[in-house]
Each structure stands twice: as structure tokens, then as C-alpha cells.
Amino acid sequence: MQTKFISIFKEQSAQSEGVQYKLSLENFIQQLRHKIATLPEEKTAIYVLVLEKIEAITVLHGPINFDNIQHYSSVLYYIFNLLKGNMEEEDAILWALGCPVHGSVFFATDSFYELMEKVNASNDDEQLKIEIASQELYALILSRLYDFPIVLPEPIYYTLQDVESGFPKHYQATVNSDFVTISSVAELPEIPFDLLKENGDFSKVNWNVLEHVLPLSKFKFEGFIVLTLKDVSMEYEMNKIKELAAVLPNGNQYNFTEKLDLAVRSLLRRSNVLFSILPLFKLNGFPILKSEFSKNSILFNILQTEQHACTRGNIQEFTQAYLKKPYPIVYQIINEISDTNSPIVDRIAFLGFTSYICVPLHYNNHLSGILEVYTKDGTRLDKHLLTKIKSLAIVLGQLTYDLSRSYEARMNAVILEKFTSLQPAVQWKFNEAAVQYLQDVEEAKSDKFIPLKSVQFKDVYPLYGAIDVRNSTAIRNKAVRKDLEVHLDLLDQLIKKLANWSPLLATDEILSAAAQWHTQLVNKDMDEIIVKITNFLEKDVPMFLDFFRNQGPRYEEAISEFEEQTNPEHGISSYQRRSYDNSLQLINNILASSLAEFHDEIQQIYPCYFEKFRTDGIEYDLYLGQSISPKIPFSSQKISEFRFMQLAAMAKIAHRCHKLLPTMQTPLETTQLIYLNPSTIDISFRHDERRFDVEGSYNIRYQVIKKRIDKICIKDSDERLTQPNTIAIVYYNSEAIKEYAAFIARLQRMQLITDQVEKLDLEEVQGVSGLKALRVHISQSL
């Protein structure tokens, strides 16, 4: 034990400046006298002894203060033995006496002083500790002077790097202020307690308010505090793992697993110990064993991929059976625990692992994951690690369960967004309809003839857009025609070769048929003959060739060469189609990623329903309005913002597709079309088709116009409205199009479109007249 003044903080807090405090034993003495007076005599001997020592030293040197504290060393040691309350060795205890404020310690164990020297040399978060210390003083003031229930702040932690293990050690500071008295140096100010609530919660105090309404300088503190530090590294890291459950990965799974890995390593405190935590994600009732979490697993990755093919099947059978009835597997742990009798243990030993334990993780008596801990450097797992692993397994049981639920929710979200018409923005409406249906079934006590409630959204603004591949049908037909010509030419060459080898065999008929199809391919419409030619090549020709295949090796070789040349995956007779398909896929990839980006941006502004339709390009409908999200205020400004974002997205799509041209085997260009509907419409969900559609005869006009304008021409002209490297904006109402002038100007400043803007009247199409359009041209300078 030492008597020495040190500060447990590296700097003084602004809140404690000007605070009056006094070092005193008076409160402690009063409590001693109270115990002596109230306890039976046989229990008061130690209290009498300590009181006599204090009184004796006080007579000689006066009440304790900062100048005479060295004379009180023996008395302080008696206080230490009286308060520590256990038989622990002095050097094992991190214990100190300190001033009531300012964080100064004047008497402590040697181990405490040694630790604080290391703390003061570390880069710990000093400001946070100071803030918590001030909050502890305010908690005392509220409790003692205002009779306000104590709401303790977060504990103070000291973190040091452990030289031996290389991992951080965490110490929690506990302050006992029983021997501190507090008094107000002026009239006690009133506190508006409602202001103390943090977010309306009385269990959480808004400490920042207290700093303004209740400065610490208005109070005087007398006495001393008892400060203890406890190594809580294991609990600290356990809490870190529990906290991870609140930030389960929504996208960046790697970042999450990295944090989990660090927390578990810090808890085990062995750099040479490896581990795997595998949540049991399930697909259709079966575990998904391949994920970021399984990369370090021996049982579900390393053994599954090892090169010994003869054992791989057995390993897979074992793991499948193991998941149905899991149990702990141990290998080379400690002498008191025998190795598990299992072929898996033999494989682990063969692969050179030193020590291994596999622990099934459970939550609510259900298997939620698998924990594996192992070494491979000659070091065995010991008893201390086994204790930690046992505690860790309990925490990881819930974490792996939560991870599995999170994965399931993410999977369902993907299904909702990518594969069904049910999207998050409108799911609440379907929830209401489902609840109403279940209630109706309960009342009727049967599910027969119970109608589903209509899911309808009134007065929504529709935004329609279409990106089409220019002349895609003609280009595809041209590619198919060229490939079929090659295919027929190759067939002609083969048949003539076979006829030359076997003049007596009948080849004239098939040769004549091939020639006729070649003539029709040149002269007739593709749509009319493609099915017939394909049927000839895929059925008649193979039957003919099968007859010749058995005539000898050279026949087999010639036919095999023909089949290789006409292979649809890589043969020369399908080169043009593959080139077209590859080019189309490049465009579709751009469209998918760009529209996904557009969708994510608009959903952050206001929830809306977004529906895509695949053609050679993509068409989409976007619906937004107050009825889709009743709880979020909607304004006309939102529709303007969405219309601008739609136009900007179309410009970016057009530019990105144009940049692809040099990389395409078959050059393809896109056209972009937007229809500006003059008013809101109503939509409802069609249960028979499982999709949304317009509601009412007036609103059907919206769908009619969409279908008519994709190939519409400019009035009194044969020129199509939609052209490559442009965006066509079709509209009825001249008033509605006015805001697009500002949109176009913004995009021109962004250099997404040029200064060329065409105002066009459009031809009358079936059932629709009076349409107009703006056509803007895409900038190619970006």
C-alpha cells in the first residue's frame, strides 16, 4: 500500500472547474459510531479499533488534509482492511481511496498504482471517462438533494494492451461514494424534471441539460471515495458479441464477420487459436453450408474440399447425419477428456491439426449453429479455454439464431422485391387485407366462399418509362438468317461428301430439301419459315445422319465435325445469334443495374411501387402518392422530384448503353421513352394475375396510351418518335410539361443532354389523338 497523490484522468474536466471539495473522514467516523452504537458488542471490536486509531492520529496531527496525509498512512491501511471485505491478497486487489471530485487518488494498493501508470501512457478515450465521472456526481446530487431515483451512467472502462497475449484487457471502475457528503453553497435551484428525460424516457437522463441548469460549482463535496478496478475482459467481449446482434449484416457481411472474429479472438485471448462460427441458414428446410461464415470451418469446408476424393463422400454423409443429431466432438484437448470415437477425428489428425473441439449451438432447445475451435501449431486447448468456450457457446447460440432469422428476412425481402409484385412500400396494405381475411374466416368458421379484400391505391401518380433496343427484331432475324445459311451450307457440303463416298446410297432427297430451304430462307419472311427450317435441321437431318454414322470411321469423323460446327453453344453456325445475345445481355445488365440504382434512390425519398416488364429492353411503371404511404406526408414537390430523377436516370442509361457500342459483337442501340400522364389514377391488385393494374374506365386510357406510343411516328411523317441517343417525352397537357424545361436545363448543365430540344406533334393512333412530345438528345461528351 502507498500514500501518493495521482490523477486517474490525464486532464481536468471543464465541468469540475471551480468545484469546492474537501478531503475528510468525518462521514466515515459518523458511520463507525453508528455501527458501534447499534450493533452487538461482539461485532463492534474492529469498528472500535479503527475509530480509536483515527481519533489518536487526529489529536496528534489534526483532521486529515492534503498536507498531513502521510501521517494517516496506518489509519488508511486499517480503513482498507475494514472496507475490502474479503481475504484476497493485497497485491491482487486494484483498490484505492480518492478525493470526492477531480479524480485524484491518495492511497491505493501497489497494483492499482502500477496499472494507472500504464493507463496514463495509453491512448484510451479520456474524454468519455471524464464525462461519465461528472455524470456520477450529478447522479449523487439528484439522489441526495432532490430525492430523484439514481440513474447511474455507463461504467468507466480502462483498456490496456496485454503484452503477453497481444489482446486488450478491460477494467471496470466502481466508485463507492457512501462516505461523501454533498451540500449546496447557495439556494438549491429548482429543476424542471421533464427536461431530464432523454427522448421522453425517465430511465435515461439527459446529462447535458444538467450541466446548464445545475453547475457543479454550486455544490460542495466532503469526504472520500472508494475506487476499485476489476478485470472484466471476458464480460466486456461477451457484451460486444451480444451488441453485434443489434447490427446484424444487411449487406456488408464481411464487415460483420470481421467484427465478430475480433470480439471472439479478444475473448479467447490466444492468437494461435482458430475458430469457426457457422449459423445454420436454411433453404427449403436444408442447411446452407457455403457462406462467409463457413470459410474457416473444418467440418463444413476444409474436410469437404480436401483432395481425398475417396473420403469426400463419407464426409458429406457424416455431416448430414451430424446435423440431424449433433454432439460435441473433441480431439487432443486435455488428458482428462478422451477423444471422440469418430472417423472425423481421424481425418482431423491426418490433416495435421493439433487440437479441436466442435460444439453444437442451441437456442430455445433448437440447433442454431456450430462452433469449432482448433489449433495447428502444436499448442493444445486447455481448461481455461474450455471454460470460456462453454460461456461463449451460450451467447453464440442466440447470435447464430438471430443471424439465421436475419438471413431469412433478407432472403424474403429479395423474393418480395425480385420475384413477386409484393414490395415493402405496399406490403402494409396486403397485411391489412390478410388480417381482414383471417378475421372473416374465424367469424364464418370456414374458409370457403370468403372473398379477399380488394387491395387498392387511389390517386397515385404514374411514371412510365421504356428502354427499347432499336430494330431488335430485324437484327435478330438477320442474325438467325445468316446462321441458318451457314448451317445449310455445312449440311450441303457434308451430304455431297457422303454421296461421293457412297454413290449408291439415297442422298438426293435430303440434298434437294436442304436446297429448297436455302431458297426459301432468302426469299420468304423469317417468321413464316424459321419453325419449319428448325424442325428440318433438328429432326430430319439427325435421322438421316444416324444412318450414315455406322458406315465406317470416316463417316463418323465427318458427321462429328459437322455436329461440332453446328453446336449451338460454340459452333460457327450459331455465331451470329450468340453475338446478338451477348450484345443484348450487355445492354440488359446495364438496364438492370441502372434501374436498381434509380429504384434505391427514389425509395429513400418516398416509398413507391416500382414494377418492371422485360422485353428486348425494359418497360417500367412507378406509382407514388399519399395512399401508398399514408403516414408520410406527400406533396406535389415529391412528384416533381421523381420526374426529374426519372429523366436523369433515362439520360444516364442512354449514355451508358451508347458507351457499350465499341465492345459489342453485334452493335445495338437503345431508344428511351417517357409518358407524362396528366393526372392521378387508381390501381388495384388483380388476384387472378397476381399483379397491379389500373382501375376504372377512365384510368384504362393510361394503359392504352402506353401500348400505342412505342412505335408512334411524328405527325405527317414516317419518322419514328423514338430514336437512338434521344429521350422522347410524350404528353397531352402543355401545362404539365412546363416543369420539364427546368429539368432539361439542369441536365444540360450536368452535360447529360445537349442543347438540341425538339417540340413535336404526334400522329393519331387507334383511339388516341392530340399527343405531343419533347425529344432531347443525349450528350456523348461525358
Image (tube, helix red, strand yellow):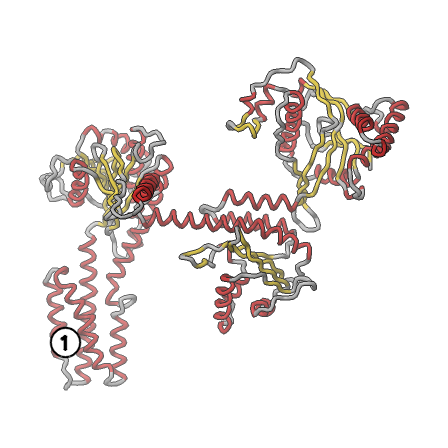
Looking at the image, residue 476 sits to the left or right of residue 423; the answer is: left
Outermost residue on the top side: it is 187
Looking at the image, residue 17 sits to the left or right of residue 782; the answer is: right
Along the line of sight, the residue nearer the viewer: 234 or 115: 234
Q: Quadrant of the N terminus?
A: top right
Q: Is residue 14 visible?
A: no
Check the image and report above or below for 494 versus 103: below
The residue under the point 68% across, 62% down is 334
Q: Is residue 182 visible?
A: yes
The x, y position of residue 413, in whole percent, is: 38, 47
The x, y position of residue 206, in whole percent, is: 56, 26
Check the image and report above or below for 694 versus 291: above
Looking at the image, residue 639 sits to the left or right of residue 489; the answer is: right
Disc 1 residue type (three-letter): Ile
Looking at the image, residue 251 sits to the left or right of residue 69; the answer is: left
For disc 1, the marked residue is 510
Q: Secondary structure at mark 1?
A: helix
